[in-house]
Image (tube, grey):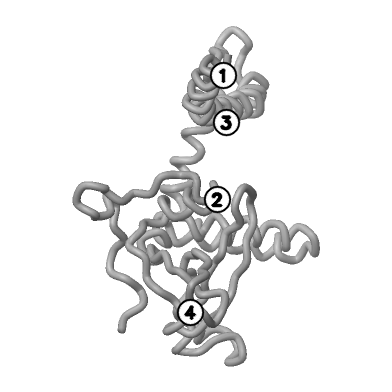
Amino acid sequence: MQHLSRIFLSGLFTVLPLAITLAILYWLATSAESILGNMIGFILPEAWYVPGMGLAAGIAVIFSAGILIRQVIFQSIFKLVETQVNRVPLVKTLYNGIRDFIDYFSPQNMKEFNQTVMIPVDDSGQRHLMGLITRTDFTDVPDEVGDENSVAVYLPMSFQIGGFMIIVPKDHVKKVDMGVEESLRFIFTGGVAKGGKNAKDGKNKNPPKEPLIKS
């Protein structure tokens, strides 16, 4: 019986990540189809509507936004909309928090900030927290926040969404040859996930680019 249970659990943990991923993608697709599909159905004659138009419209809207935001005039319009949003007390807090979190994982920032570090939690130097550098330049904030010898490090929480941001001296962090995706997966799963290190040659399959912390 225990042997059968182990086989079942092995199959479950193999299928579950893929199933959850597909479920999220399905939810996003059906949401786009439902919202935009209803809008299209309201505009077009009923006989012209084909299932899937809502999803196609959602993809087209995303691509269009990516193209338009590169234009100066649309950047100005977008900033104007953001200014109006930031005037609403509760909405601006929610919007800015979501925007900053997503911006950190945007392709531009992922290229710039691709450094995993370990931070000691006591004087012994034997206990560490794993984090990701989010800032090395503090020229746009008050002097009390950080200086040229400091770095900001994001410490994600395991098994949940959230974390802490701490500012520490550069010489208090130890660089780790681990990409952002591997380190986030490692932290979020509480160390259960396998890293990107190749056991045969000891090298990271996806090594980070030039470190931000230079000696």
Q: Residues within 10 Å of mark 3 (few under 14, many from 20)?
A: few
Mark 4 or 1, nearer chain start? 1
What kind of element bears circle 1?
A: helix
Q: Residues under labels 3 and 4: Cα distance?
A: 35 Å
Three-letter code for the amino acid on which mark 3 is drawn:
Ile
Q: Residues under labels 3 and 1: Cα distance?
A: 32 Å
Q: Residues under labels 3 and 2: Cα distance?
A: 22 Å
Residue in the image at 54% along x and 23% along y: 9
Q: Residues under labels 4 and 2: Cα distance?
A: 24 Å
Q: Residues under labels 4 and 1: Cα distance?
A: 50 Å
Q: Residues within 10 Å of mark 1 (few under 14, many from 20)?
A: few
Q: Position of residue 151 (x, y in %)?
A: 48, 79
**Badges 4 and 1: C-beta atoms under 8 Å apart?**
no
Determine if residue 57 is in view. Answer: no
Circle 4 residue: 151
Circle 3 residue: 24
Three-letter code for the amino acid on which mark 4 is drawn:
Val
Between circles 3 and 4, the one closer to the viewer is 4
**Badges 2 and 1: C-beta atoms under 8 Å apart?**
no
Q: Quarter of the image for the C terminus: give it.
A: bottom left
Circle 2 residue: 190
Residue in the image at 61% along x and 27% along y: 27
Q: Position of residue 65 (x, y in %)?
A: 48, 46
Circle 1 residue: 2
